[in-house]
Every structure is written in C-alpha cells, then in structure tokens.
Amino acid sequence: MKFTVEKKSQNSLARAGKIETAHGVIETPAFVPVATQAAFKGVMPEVAKAVGTQVIFANTFHLHLSPGEAVVKLAGGIHKFMNWSGPIMTDSGGFQVFSLGVAYGQGVSKVAMTPRTVLKRVPQGQSLGLLSASLVKIDDDGVDFRSPRDGSLHRLTPEFSIAIQHDLGADIILVFDECTTPQATDAYQAMALARTHAWAKRSLAEHERLGGDQALYGIVQGGRFPDLRTESAQFMSTLGVDGFAIGGSFNKEDIGVVVALVNKQLPFDRPRHLLGIGEVEDIFAGVASGVDTFDCVTPTRLGRHGTVETKEGRLHLISNQFATDFQPIETDCACPTCQHYTRAYLSHLFRSKEMLSTTLASTHNLFFFNSLMAQIRQAILHDALDAFRQQFLARYLPR
C-alpha cells in the first residue's frame, strides 16, 4: 500500500490524497460502505461500484462464523468470493467486544448523545466500572464470544484475528482491539487501553510472521479522555504500522475535538480511518480534523428502513405524504434510482414490504455519500472546504 497527500487544507487538518492498493486506488477523503458478511444489504456489488463506491469494509468475526475463512480462502479470497474487484478493508472483530458485550440488548451506542462535559481522570483503583457482558468474556489474552446465531462458544485472540484476516485476503486489515462504551469509567478505559496496546503488538508480530502484502492499521482508543487518546496515538505511531484507525467511544459534540487531538499526534504520511462514523455532520467534522476514510452501515441501514438522504435532509418515504409525490428522491441526482423511479413508487414499495424498496433506497444512499465525499475532496483541492461545509450543512441541517 502507498499513501500520498495531494493537498493539505490551509484552514484545517483536512487533506486530499490517494491510497494505492493491489486492487485499485482510493481517492480520499472517501466513504467506505460496510459489507459485513461480504455483501451489501440489498445492493449488488456491481451496482455499488457503478454509483461510485471505491472501497468496502467487511467484518472478520461474522465471516469467521459464516462461511468461515477457510471457505473464503478456498474461493480465492474475499474479492473473488463476493465479486468485488476494488480494495477491501476488514475489521479485526474488536467491535464485537462492544456490540456483543456491554452494548448487547442495551441500546448503547459508541457515540453518546449527552450534553458536552469535560471528563477528568479518577485516581487509579476507584470506580473500576467493569463490563458485565452478555455474550462476551474478556481477559488479557483474548475474548470468548457466544455466537449471536446459535450460542456456540468462540475464542478470538490477536493472533487468531490476524490469521483470519490473512485468509480472507483484504487489502487493509486491522489489529485486534477492545472497543469500550462512552459510559465506561476512566479506570476501565485505561485498563482497556493497556490491553489494546498489548494486543496491537501481538497483532503486528503475527502479521509479520505470516508475511504477505496486506497493509496493517493500528487502532487508537482511549474513549473521551484526552490524555488516554494522546497516549494511544503516540504508542501506535511507534509501531511501524501502515496506517491508523480511530476507534472507540465519543460524545456527539466532541468527535471533531477528540479526532483532531489524535491526528495531530499521528504521522502525517500515513492514512487515517475513522471507524463506524456515518452521519453527514460527523463526516465533515472528521474530514476537517484530518480523517481520510470513514466506514459506516448508514446508507444501507437507512435504506432498508425507508429513509433516504438528500441535500435537504432525510426523507422517510414510508410516510403517506409521499403516496402521490411523483418526483424523484432528488431532482438533480444522477443515481439510477432517481433517474427511473419516483418517491410515490418507493413509498408504495415500502408500505407493501417489497424487497425492491431496500435496493432502490440503498442505491440512492450509496450514491449520496460517494457524491458528497467527491465534492468534499474537490473542495479541499480548491481550498474551499469551509465554505462548502457551511453551504451544505445550512441546507441539510436547517435551523
């Protein structure tokens, strides 16, 4: 993998660049749609590529459960298995420490919506805040998971996570980490961070032992605590990894602040990925804070629930107000959905529970995010990011 910064913003940490991989070039900033189980929900890979998708994100843990990394390797790797010719990233399975652990069945998000507060460290030994996990048991060696499919027990360690990712054959793979909840205490965040750093070293050692030409990203954790984030960014910078992912928990209002703090510590000449962030305003904040790529399930998750993105904000097409609205989702949109179908037709499909509704809405949403990132890239190249951000959000988030 090779990364080049083509343009640095004069007024922020934003930059436009290129990530060159064995399966193609990623022009950054870029959105990375999630294909968790080597599939976009409701959208064929060919269509995803036709609407501007450059790179996709698959999940190690879920592909380990089904069909198994051995099957994917036998098929010739994940690219051939799912008929995707472009670059692919894989998560390490660390997010499942969160989603199947403290977040399982609790409605807990990695982004807190509480009013902004300044968090201070508590003396070591106070308020340990240990996780009470439903399907996960964490120790310093690794994690035991109960499969959400059938309850079977699985053991995931840094070495095993890297071995799975090597077998899957993605272009960019991630170290194994522990993702925590925004509600975790500082003491637990510190404990999890030490574990994440130890796992990163073990992940790198296994990656080097196995060989190959995949790029490995380190993951910066530390929650909402500036000192922990700084410590993590500085530690990951010393490992010699090919790039960096920023993970863990945030407050909705301080994503940009925390991410900027991290990116000021990370080497300028390597790419930075923000894990699991897909709200439009958060993407702008991340770009301005020096992020190159973002992954999220937003386009297809919204799409299969009847919601589409537009420059005027989100539309909930299931609503009866669209039953006789015979204009496209957006009149100036070049996506296949807007070129051939109306809001009224999509509203009918959703209310009739037709599967085609998901495909058409998700296709439009993928185009929306890819188009937005292309416009953001051009704005950076022309030193106009601030103006474009203000103009876009004034329409998208009316006061």
Image (cartoon, helix red, strand yellow):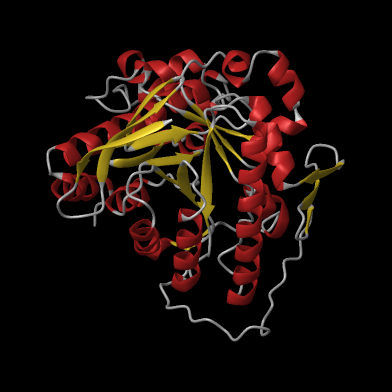
Image quadrant holding the N terminus, namely top left
* Residue in the foreground of this view, choosing between 208 and 195: 208
Query: In screen coordinates, is 279 left or right of 125?
Result: left
Residue 224 vs residue 10, the one in the foreground: 10
Q: Quadrant of residue 326?
A: top left
The residue sitting at 54% across, 30% down in the picture is 214
Q: Is residue 78 left or right of residue 257?
A: right
Q: Quadrant of residue 237?
A: bottom left
Q: Quadrant of the C terminus?
A: bottom left
Q: Residue at x 48, y 40 (%)?
A: 296
**Is 292 drawn above or below residue 75 in the view shown?**
below
How many labels, in total?
0
The residue at 50%/62% (across/down) is 232
- Image coordinates of residue 13 in percent, x first then y, are 26, 53
The answer, for residue 365, to whether it is visible in the render is yes
Q: Is residue 362 above or below residue 162?
A: above
Residue 184 in view here = no
- The answer to whether 191 is drawn above or below residue 120 in the figure is above
Decide if residue 355 is on the left or right side of residue 103.
left
Depth check, front residue: 49 or 41: 49
Identify the residue at image location x=69%, y=30%.
63
Residue 107 image point, x, y percent: 63, 57
Along the horizontal axis of the image, is 254 left or right of 159? Answer: left
Relative height, residue 146 to residue 238 (above, below) = above
Residue 302 location, x and y as percent? 48, 37
Q: Residue furthest right?
A: 152
Residue 248 in percent (x, y) is at 54, 57
